[in-house]
Every structure is written in structure tokens, then in C-alpha cells.
Image (tube, rainbow, N blue to C red):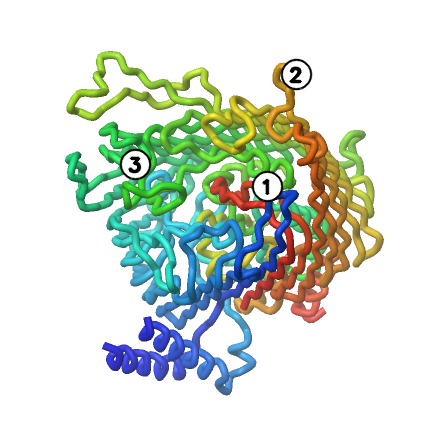
Amino acid sequence: MKTLFTLAFVFFSGISAFSQDTHATESQLKQLPSVNLKDMNGKSVNTAAIGVDGPIIISFWATWCAPCKKELNTIHELYEDWQAETGVTLVAVSIDDEKTKSQVPVYVNGKAWDYMVLMDPNGDFKRAMGVNNVPHTFLVDKDGNIVYSHNNYAPGDEEKLYKELLHLSGK
Amino acid sequence: MNKLLLAASGLFITFLSFAQGSLTGNIESTFQYLNADSIIDAKQPAEKGLINSYMNVFYTQGNFKAGMRLESYLPRIQGYPNRFDGTGIGMRYIGYTNGFVDVTLGSFYEQFGTGLAFRAYEDRALGYDNMMDGARIIVRPTSGLVIKGVYAYQRLSFQGGNIIHGDGIVRGIDGEFHLNEGLKKMKDFPLDVVLGASFVSKYQEDNNPDLILPQNVGTYGGRMKLRYKNFYGDIEYVQKEQDPSSDNNYIYNYGHASVFNVSYTRKGLGILVSGKSVDNMSYRSDRTKDLQDVFVNYLPSLNKTHTYNLVATLYPYATQPLGEVAYQTDVLYTIKKGTKLGGKYGTTIGGNFSTTYQPTHSTNGINPLDSTGVTYVCRPFQASDSMYWQDINFNITKKFNKKFSTILSFYSIKINNDVVKISNDASGIIHANIGVAEFAYKFNSKHSLRTEIQGLFVEKEAGAIKDKGNWATLLVEYSISPGWFFSFMNQYNYGNPDVAKRVNYPILTCGYIRDATRFTVSYGRQRAGLFCVGGVCRFVPASNGLTLSFTQSF
């Protein structure tokens, strides 16, 4: 046990030493981790290479999460304008597991969402992104750097996200 | 040994300090200070204060990856599994990955197909963690083909700050092929096809003096997914070899599990029909364990996961691994905006129906006492007329204008309390009807108010009140975007047959969120109930006191 702790200590001091290096501004930016997921149609997508131009909003949600659905339904009404102005793509990552996963396309299509929807049934991407609970929304620049994130959703939060998005697009 | 490890980690640091990588992770900490409250039968723990914490750190640098989680229970919060205590490393791994292979040594989570044969999963909020500890390889030989291999012990508990492994070892291999990605000829074929197969085996020594137990138990099966235009269908079937265990009372039957989904979706409409058949499918890496311990597979219950308090926690349903046959239909339709009923924003109507029955056990020509140990025959999807569960629910979501919106919901739930033991105060089928009205009002771009009014009405049986009778809940939540929220909730068990138990459960919560940091404070009473995430439930006793929680992502 003692050894494990020593190891952990050494590991963390190593990490902190490395993260305080001269490239502070670069290392402050978190890169999108690489996880292999599937979209709603079963096509493989690597999260580090989503394959779209322009900024990305990544929003973790689930069919059983009321504030998540409220957030995505609110953005749905604004999405066309946001896309036209900033070229943004919204990736809605569903953390529904096998119990409710099959209800995801029913909800997404029933609500006529135009988002890219990825399935994360065993929480691999959720874990890699350090998501404690949903909703959790990330804004990612065109180089894959995470520039803003917000946990929780309250009406009006989409305006903060929009401001960050405009800022990122230099508008 | 110590020196060797130190030297190794020294090398590791040197490597890290030269490397440019990416670090992600998260922290969560929950503290409780509990009071004794005799009215709701809440006890004060001897320590008075309880705290759970954990922190994940994941590091990737090029093709290299490493990560760990430190966990701490000093002691664990109320309702958390009692096998968690101390501070230490609960998960750690190193690995290498490129486009072709992905190797992990140490801890990992993984799922084959829908998880009927194999799924290692964690839910920290529930205290559910059947992590694998060993080795995993994932190979992607060609586009569309994925092969996974796992070999590991399972995490059973966390004691004195150490991971405690289950008794048995788990091995498995899984292959999945997406024909349209892998075969050139299929690339533009309108029918989309995915095929998969898995084989899982567990080994546990036979240390039972009375029985000859199979030491190696295999589970294997196949799956298929088809998509054609707006239609989608999938099916998986797995079979388990003879696996006498304390769950199935040491019988020598084979087991099976199967799930299918058929759906039709287009813009504005989604329809889903699902079915499931399970028999003798409890599959653990230790045959003597129970509750949520060392499950190798996952048997999701086939019903909607509800979110409103009274619906979600009073009468939830969890799969009966010994056997059940279940069906579900889920429909969502949005009435177009600009129409009379659709209004300016469109109106959404949702409906969901789910039902579960005991499977038929045929004992024709079988002597349950003979030396085979086979006690019955069960064919897939053959249901008896003994009902375990039924849920019919509807909801309407309507936004009237920029400021005001509402969601109205109705649920009718029947649960067989003799099989799915949910309450000590009732027997037979409990039938509850629940109505929820939610209203949201946005004052301006930052300030908004949300209320929920919920009523739960239990049907009487021969004039007598069943279980705990009727409940009412009121929730008021005021939020100031993006930083603050304040909420007040009161649950009132006004219909309890025992007048002394007609109790109010008020609770105040306040939260502050800044970017990826979140603090919440709540004070009040919490009713005993089942806390469920994704069909896995944990019983939480009644409590009265203060809860502080902190979460951070990085």
C-alpha cells in the first residue's frame, strides 16, 4: 500500500512539474481526448477527429435528464442562426446506457434535432472528459482545444455559451 | 520492491517532464452532517459527519495513456455500499493505442454488444463498480471490424483503501463487423448491416464439498443490427452454460438472455418497440455473491427511466436476473409549429408503455430432484400470466411564448411487491397513479422560475389503503444564469394509513456553478427510497441534515 502511495505521489508531482513548464498557455488548453464512439446510425466516430470544420459544441445528455433536454431543445431553436453566424456543429453525446439507449433516436427524431448524435453507452467518453454529471457542455475550437465548459443548465446559460462562441469565432 | 518501483516512477517522471501531453479528469466530494430524527426513523451515525471523495486523472501523450482514481470514504455517506472504506487508489492503468491496436494493463471498463454477456461499468453516484483489473486488447484490423479481448479479475469492493478482487477470473473475446464500412461492395448499399459475436468465460475454483460445480462457465452469443431508410432493428441472443450459484439456488440449468428493438423514426416522429427475455442469467465472477456484486454482465430493465421525484424513487423496477419476459413501446411526436395545435414552437406528445411478466417454467418430464440438477425448461419469450411490472405514461410539452412553457405528465404504474420487493408495508400488486404539472417562467435573460406539482395516488384494495398511501410534492426552483440556483422541495405523505407517519419532508438546496466547478448545499429531510441510475438501484435510508457537495472537471 505504502508503495502505491509513493507511486501516486511521484506520479502527481511528475504531472504538476510537467504542467508548470514554459508552455503554460498551451498546456492550459485541454485537447479533446480520443475515444471511439458510434453515431446513431452505427457509424464509427473518433472523438479526436470528429471531421467537421469550425467550432464544436459538445453537450453530454441523456433521455432521463430533464435539464439536458431543456438545454438542447432551447439551442435547437437557435441552432440555424448559430450555424450561419459561426459555422458551429453541435455534437450531442448521449450517455444513455443499454436500458434507454434505444429511446435516443426516438427522442432525437421526435424532436427533429439537427445535431450530430454520438452514443456513449458505457461512459468511456464521459470519463475521459472528466464529466461528473449531466448536463455538461464544452466548447471546442477548430484545432480540438477545449476553450470553455459549463456544468448544469439554467435558462439563459445558452446566451453565455453563444457569447463564448462568438468570441471564439472572432465576432 | 519499493526501490524498484521508485526507480520506475522516477523514469516515468523524467519521461513526463519532457513530454507534451494532455491531462483530463474530475473531482467529486460529498459531505453529510446528519441529525437524528425519530419521526422519519433517521439515525445519527456515531461519527456525525460522513464524506465520500474521488478524483480521476487521465493522461495521454501521443500513443501513450495512463490514468488513476483515488478514492476516499471517511466514512462513506449514507446508503452507500458498506464495503467502501479508507483512502487509496481505486483504479489505475497504463496503455498504448494507435489506429490499429489499443492495449490496456490495469483497470478498465468495457462492454460487449448490449452487455448481456459482458459489461464492466461504474456509477460512482450509486457506488456501483464492477471494474476489470487485468489486461485488454482492442484490434481494428480493417475499417469496420473491431475485435476485443479481455482477461481480468473484477473489483468486488474497496476496503482499507485497497481494491478487493472477486474470487473468479473473467476472460472474453468479442468481434463486431460493420459490413458497410468494411466491404467496398456494401459501401453505398441501402441496407446497413452490423454483425457481432462474443464469448465470455469465468473461472472459479470449486470449493463446495457437497456439489460438483463447473469451474469454468461460458456465455456466448451473437447479434445483428439492420437499418433500412427510416427503419431500424437489432437483436442479440446469448446463452449461458450451467452455472449453479446462490442466486439460482445451485441448479444446473442453462440460461439465456435476448433483447430486440424495432424502430421507425423521421423528423418529428419516433416509434420504438422492444422485447426482452431472460432466464437464469445472473452471471457473476463469484457464484456466492449477491446484490450488485461482481456481475459480469448487464441485464437492463425494459422501461423508461423517469425523472420526477415521486415517479423515479418510490416504485422503480429493476430486472429480475432469474427470469422475466418484457415488452416496451415508446412514441414521441411533435405537432408542427405554425399549426393550430402546434402553436408557435410546436407541441410534443410522448407515450410509453412497458410491461414485464414471469416466464413460463415447464416441468413436464423433468424430475427436479434427479442427478442432472435441471429443474425446469424455459423457452425464450414464453411469458406466464404472473405480472411483475406495468407502466403506462404520457406527457405533453408545450411552449406558449418566449417566457412560459409547461410539461404535463401522467403515469400509471403497477409493481408486484412480492417479487420486486420495494416496500415492507405491502403485499401483492401496488398500483399507483401519478400526475405531474411542471411550469417554467423566464423573467429575463438571466432569471427564471420553475415549479413542479406532483401527486401520487395509490389505488385502494378492498377499501384499505395500500403501502404508504398518497403523496404530494411541491418543488420551486429559482435560477440566475449562469451561476446560481435556489430550490425548495417538500414531499408530504398525507395519505399514510398510519396518521403518525403523515410526515413532511422539506429540503432547501442552493447551488453555485462557475464553468466546470459546482458547489451545492442542501439542508432538510430526505425520505427513504430507491436511488436508481440506468436501472441499477440502491436503497437510501431516510435522513435529516446537511449535505455539501463539490464537483470539478479539468
- To the question of a shared chain for discs 1 and 3, the answer is no
Q: Residue type at mark 1?
A: Val
Left or right of A113? Residue B376 is left
Left or right of B42? Residue B377 is left
Could you tell me residue B145's position as x and y percent?
A: 32, 48
**Which quadrant is the C terminus of chain B positioned in?**
bottom right
Which residue corresponds to mark 1? A108
Subunit of label 2: B
Could you tell me residue B275's position as x and y percent?
A: 45, 27
Which residue corresponds to mark 2? B463
User: Looking at the image, can residue A112 be seen?
Assistant: yes
The structure residue drawn at horizontal position 68% and vertical position 47%, both measured from the top left corner, is A70
Left or right of B218? Residue B526 is right
Q: Identify the element where label 1 is drawn.
A: helix
**Which quadrant is the N terminus of chain B positioned in?**
bottom left
- Disc 2 crowd, CA 10 A, few/some/many (<14, 14-19, 20+): few
Q: Identify the element where label 2 is drawn.
A: loop
Which residue corresponds to mark 3? B246
Between the residue at mark 2 and the residue at mark 3, the CA separation in whole angstroms equals: 40 Å
